[in-house]
Structures are given as C-alpha cells and as structure tokens.
Amino acid sequence: MRKFTSFVLALAFAASLQPVLPARAQQQSAATARTSAAVSAPLAPATVKAAELITADQLSRHLNVVASDAMAGRDTPSPGLDETAKYIADHLKQLKVKPAGDGGTYFQRMTLRRTEVDREKTQARVGARVFKAGEAFVPFSPNAGEAEGQVVYAGHGWVFKPKGMNPYEGLDVRDRVVVISGTGTSLPAGLTQADLDAAAAADWETPVSYAQKHGARALVVVP
C-alpha cells in the first residue's frame, strides 16, 4: 500500500515558497449535517419539557468541574479523563439513566492507537538542505511516511466548483510533492463555511483530499 505523506514546514522554508492542512472531516461533517437536518423529526413534548429544566447555572457547574485544573487536560488516556468519566457516570446514576455500557455499567472499553514520530530519524530534504522534525517542520500523523518526487505548487489547494475555484487546473499532481500555502485550517479568501454547507459534497475538495485522490506522493504546507 502506498503511503501519503503530509507535513508542515516552518517559516525558515517560507522564504522560498510562501504558505495548510484543513481536515476532510469538515467536508464529511457538512454532508452529515445536511442529511441529519433532512430526516430530523419534531421533538416529543416530554423531551422539550426535560430540556427546559436545564439551566445555565447547571451547565456552568458541570463545565467548571470537567474543565478544571484537577482534570489535568483529560488526555486520552489519563487519570484526569478517568475522573471525568466517573463524574459523568455518577450523575447519570443519580438521574436513574439505564446504563448501556460494558457489563451493565456506564463505561465502554475502546482500543486506542498511538503514533509516535522518531525525531532522530525523521527529516525533510529539499536539495542539499535538511530540515529536522519538531524544529523546522511537523509531520501530520497518521499519514506521515516517506515520499520523494518533483515539487509542484498549488496555491491554497482548495477546489470549489460553484465559484470556479481550482488551483490545480492544468497541474498534474500524480507522483509529485504538492506544496500549498494557507493559514492553518481556515478557508482561503472568497470561500466561506456557508459556501461549503450549501454545496454538494462532490463540488469541493480540501487540499488533502484532492492530493490523495489524484495520486500525489506528499503534501507540504507552508504556513
């Protein structure tokens, strides 16, 4: 199976290229939201009545516990996350909510996978220049891997057909390293989240999804 590599170069490299890597989750979530809205049914009166009992003070009290320093950020996994889960489970029990977790509890065990970068063996080379991981660039896991090929520049990398936005027009990215510029996960000028929500999923592509679908070997994002 071929690997698709993506990483961000720091500003040290920006002088020769100029400026990211939005996630495909935005595209998927927008499509899901439209589907959910189309099939949603009116809420039952009992549900509305129960929701009206929730107050801002209640939400604030729970949030101050869950987001407190005592939970230490609730990393996955971590003692803080376990304490947060126990806090939520205790309240579900008080509300007499029927448990639906493992073994008749409020908890469910899940298998986690962790990807770690070997900084000593991970580097990016551009000609004779060598960039160190964590100092000059950041690999995007879990898609990190090895890649080598001709470099092509694709502007901001977003495709949006309704507005004729296609920085790849006339550009073949197959088996090449695509370089794009941007500002984090924000959209480029002239494109809004409302545009994406209103368009069909097939009418737009993020820089990552386009590069992967069209056979690019890697995506380099210069912030």
Image (cartoon, rainbow, N blue to C red):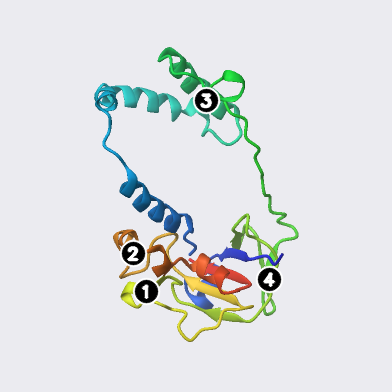
Q: Which one is in front in this view, the residue at disc 2 or the one at disc 4?
A: 2
Task: Please name the residue that numbered disc 4 is placed on.
Answer: 147
Q: Residue at x 58, y 28 (%)?
A: 108
- Residue at disc 4, secondary structure: loop
Q: Quadrant of residue 63?
A: top left
Q: Residue at x 62, y 55 (%)?
A: 141
Contact flag, marks 2 and 1 (Cβ < 8 Å): yes
Residue 157 in picture, x, y percent from top left = 46, 72
Q: Please tell me which residue lies in front, 70 or 154.
A: 154
Task: Please name the residue that numbered disc 2 is placed on.
Answer: 199
Q: Disc 2 versus disc 1: distance between alpha carbons?
A: 9 Å
Q: Earlier in the sequence, mark 2 or mark 4?
A: 4
The three-letter amino acid code for the residue at tag 4 is: Ala
Q: Disc 4 versus disc 3: distance between alpha carbons?
A: 41 Å
Q: Residues within 10 Å of mark 3 (few under 14, many from 20)?
A: some
Q: Earlier in the sequence, mark 2 or mark 3?
A: 3
Q: Residue at x 57, y 79 (%)?
A: 173
Q: Please tell me which residue lies in front, 87 or 210.
A: 210
Q: Earlier in the sequence, mark 2 or mark 1?
A: 1
Query: From the viewer's perspective, is residue 210 above or below residue 40?
Result: below
Q: Which one is in front in this view, the residue at disc 2 or the one at disc 3?
A: 2
In the image, farthest residue toward the right: 121
Residue 15 in picture, x, y percent from top left = 51, 76
Q: Residues within 10 Å of mark 2 (few under 14, many from 20)?
A: some
Query: From the viewer's perspective, is residue 47 above or below residue 14?
Result: above
- Residue at disc 1, secondary structure: helix
Residue 192 in picture, x, y percent from top left = 31, 63
Task: Please name the residue that numbered disc 1 is placed on.
Answer: 161
Q: Disc 3 versus disc 1: distance between alpha carbons?
A: 44 Å
The three-letter amino acid code for the residue at tag 1 is: Lys
Q: Please tell me which residue lies in front, 140 or 52.
A: 52
